[in-house]
Image (cartoon, grey):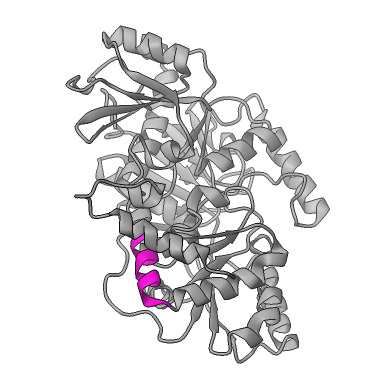
Amino acid sequence: MNKGSFTLADRQLLVVSDRDVRHPDAGGQERYLHQVARRWAGWGASVSWAVERAPGLPDVEPIDGVMVVRSGIRSWRQPSVLTQVARRAHAVVDATGYPRGSVLAGGRAPIVAVVTDPPPGPDDTRPSSLSALRRLSWYSAARAPRGADAIVTLSPAARHAVRRHARARGPVFVVPPGTGPGATSGARSADPLIVIDTQLALDRRIDVFLRALAAVAGQLTDLTVEILGTGPELPRLRRMIADGALERVVSLPGRLPESERDRRLARAWLTVSTATAELAGFEPLRAAALGVPCLVLDTPGADNFVLGGRTGYVVADQEQLGAEIVRGVRLLSDQRYADLTARCCRLWAGLFGWDRTVQLLARVVEHRIAMADAGRYGPAQRRSARSDITTRVRLPAGVPAPTAGLRVTDEVVVCDGAVELLLNGCDEVDAVSVLRRLGVTGASVRLAGRHDLLIGPRRLPPALAGHQGDRGDMWRVPFYDEFDVYRRQPA
């Protein structure tokens, strides 16, 4: 990571979202924001978090060094305490679903919109009127004269959705979520177990999973399913379970404490995502950290967070879902295959650290603060390519990591003794200019792919990339031969 000369220490920052981490319906977005805000506070920044009011929770509460203000952010007339915080802020981080932080800022503080639920495309499965309204809201907000100064998405697929469906202007950065250390003790269930931990909302399409399950329950007589969480779809799902005679197979324990959710998920053989899009990666990554593979429909973003055949399975369409559940469970009944898969899952999740996530988002915020100050606009910022274009550069052996001449949003990593760079908003032509300023020749330059954006300028381990490793490496060729044998088995 390029630290540059910027820091968020002594900054006053305002985070805006609908819910905080203590809200009864808190989910992946709230955990993401909590990890970011508390680490920024630990750096010495003054961080306030403005959210909607919640029953039973105080209007103002410190949580891990962050001052949470529950004042009803949807109101156009804000309480004076929130207005004062917003006007003093050096930057506003808006995660309300579409850029509307300008309503709160009331001044010239840069606004960085963090988008975990991008605008729907034309094929969105939600009611047409709701989809149209969300697209209109996004389009209007994204193109408003005082909208977000920068947008942060959690995956390359989400960035594409923001550009294509919202037609957002301005820079869009990818800052994927992190994962904590997964459970290292406890055995998986003796009998086949599928655990799904998600918000029971329409776009998660749990009904698709239940219909597929009803068709294959007779083939997996010892299978049980736990669907954790709560949400507006809960009553309908209960009716579907009763109508499909799935009470023996499926349980709905509701929302559980995080430690209990992790304990149950760690016992699973498999988790399943039937969402209309998997653009944030919260559920597949959380399962992977616990060694649990994810079966996911081939929807936008599915291949961003699930490596098919390594950390899960990507199903082509809903009609094949039932057959692939049966195939996955039968493959995972082989303990050796299950151990290989769990090993790959943990390895993949280990590439997504919260430290990198927090640093990347901090650099975007600091970059926008710097851009608001014309006196700090230097040659390193002058790039002609759109921010969606990122270039990966590998410096020649022996060339040290640059300490100046880069954007604060650029990423620098030393990998296998060589220096690797990710240059944001930079194509190959711009990269040549950057390298010329650095006095570097003979570097390897190519456009960054989705894995570069997700895990940084690092190489995928051979076990995940599918390439043969060196004989001395822990991921040896027989590892792949075993996976190939399983892949050749008939369904």
Q: Residue at x 75, y 56 (%)?
A: 125
Q: From the viewer's perspective, is 64 left or right of 147?
A: left
Q: Residue at x 71, y 80 (%)?
A: 215
- Between 132 and 183, the one lying in front of the other is 183
Does residue 179 appear in this view?
Answer: no
Q: Residue at x 45, y 52 (%)?
A: 69
Q: From the viewer's perspective, is 489 left or right of 406?
A: right
Q: Is residue 124 above or below residue 288?
A: above
User: What quarter of the picture does the N terminus occupy?
Assistant: top left
Magenta highlight on residue 335: yes
Q: Position of residue 170 (x, y in %)?
A: 57, 25
Q: Is residue 467 above or below residue 298?
A: above
- Between 64 and 126, the one lying in front of the other is 126
Q: Position of residue 123 (x, y in %)?
A: 76, 49
Q: Which residues are magenta?
A: 334-344
Q: From the viewer's perspective, is 459 left or right of 31?
A: left
